Image (cartoon, helix red, strand yellow):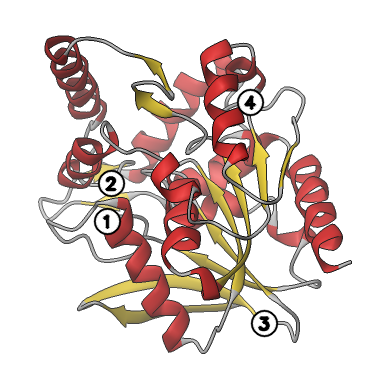
Amino acid sequence: MIDKYIEVNKIKIHYNEYPCEKETVIFLHFGFSSLAMWNGVIPYFKDKYRLILIDYRGHGLSDKPKTNYHIDEMADDIIVLMEKLGINHAHFVGSSLGAELSVSIAARYADKVLSVVVEGSAMNNVYGHYGLSNPSEEDKKKESEQMLERIRASQVFYDSPEELLKKLKDTYEPRGFWNEHVKTMAEYEIYKTPEGKYTGTVPLWVSESYMQNYWTTKFEEYYQSIKIPVLFLPREENWKNEKFRNALKYFRSLLSESKIVHIKGGKHAHVWLFFPEECSKVVLEFLKDIKN
């Protein structure tokens, strides 16, 4: 495994590479996380594809500038990274925010993308005809403010990494959201502030900047430009929602080739951490079908 930094758009981006003389698969992690979320998945892919795992700007070990957190801007970083690594085209596997970036890349850089796996996000809008609700402008503003308040409240600082990890384990283990893959991810994502404190989240300005754009994103504007195969992995909870199904049905109607697979018991984003083998088998089968 190659563990390196590369300068992209005037910032340092951290990435891992698993070399292989075969097609490239780029894994894009969920929001406010890191490339370490794929630790349980990599063993199933590393001998079959060249793998690239990326910490986006503001995430993981990459630089954390104050600006440029629209999904298109973050996606542009990935395109520059591909060019610098000599990657002409790749398959993209995206979880939540990573799914949004994958869709953005597929729509705007068609020649760079062989296929896309979409999980956790980008299967519906937040609001409107293809959203899960259509509140008034006043209620939209109130909801966004409440979300930002929850984000701000979630950034707690600790005196040591050990204290932070214990708090995470004590919080999530009783709810069934703790295993070795989650622990590995949590350890990787510990961020030491300039003040010498420790936190497990990305800086607040990253979360706030991204969320300000997220509310108004219209994914149909991306899907109408995508010409490659797309695999959707919706979670069971969303699939029970008629508005969600209608939105995804419309997005799929804009595509020439798409497929839906349900991972039994899968939860938003964390499905890769708790069902790495099942997820990997589904994606590998999808990639095999494309090749054939």
Circle 4 residue: 235
Element at label 3 = loop
Element at label 4 = loop
Circle 3 residue: 19
Element at label 2 = loop
| Residue 33 appears in the figure | yes
Please identify the residue farthest to the right as the structure is shown: 292
Q: Amino acid at mark 4?
A: Arg
Q: Eyeballing the image, is 32 above or below 103? A: above
Of labels 4 and 1, earlier in sequence is 1
Q: Eyeballing the image, is 22 above or below 169? A: below
How far apart are the two marked residues, 2 and 1, measured between alpha carbons?
Answer: 6 Å
Q: Are marks 4 and 1 in contact (CB under 8 Å)?
A: no
How far apart are the two marked residues, 2 and 3, measured between alpha carbons?
Answer: 28 Å
x%, y% of residue 153? Answer: 20, 23
Q: Residues within 10 Å of mark 3 (few under 14, many from 20)?
A: some
x%, y% of residue 238? Answer: 58, 19
Circle 1 residue: 58
How far apart are the two marked residues, 4 and 3, measured between alpha carbons?
Answer: 31 Å
Nearer mark to the viewer, of 4 and 2: 4
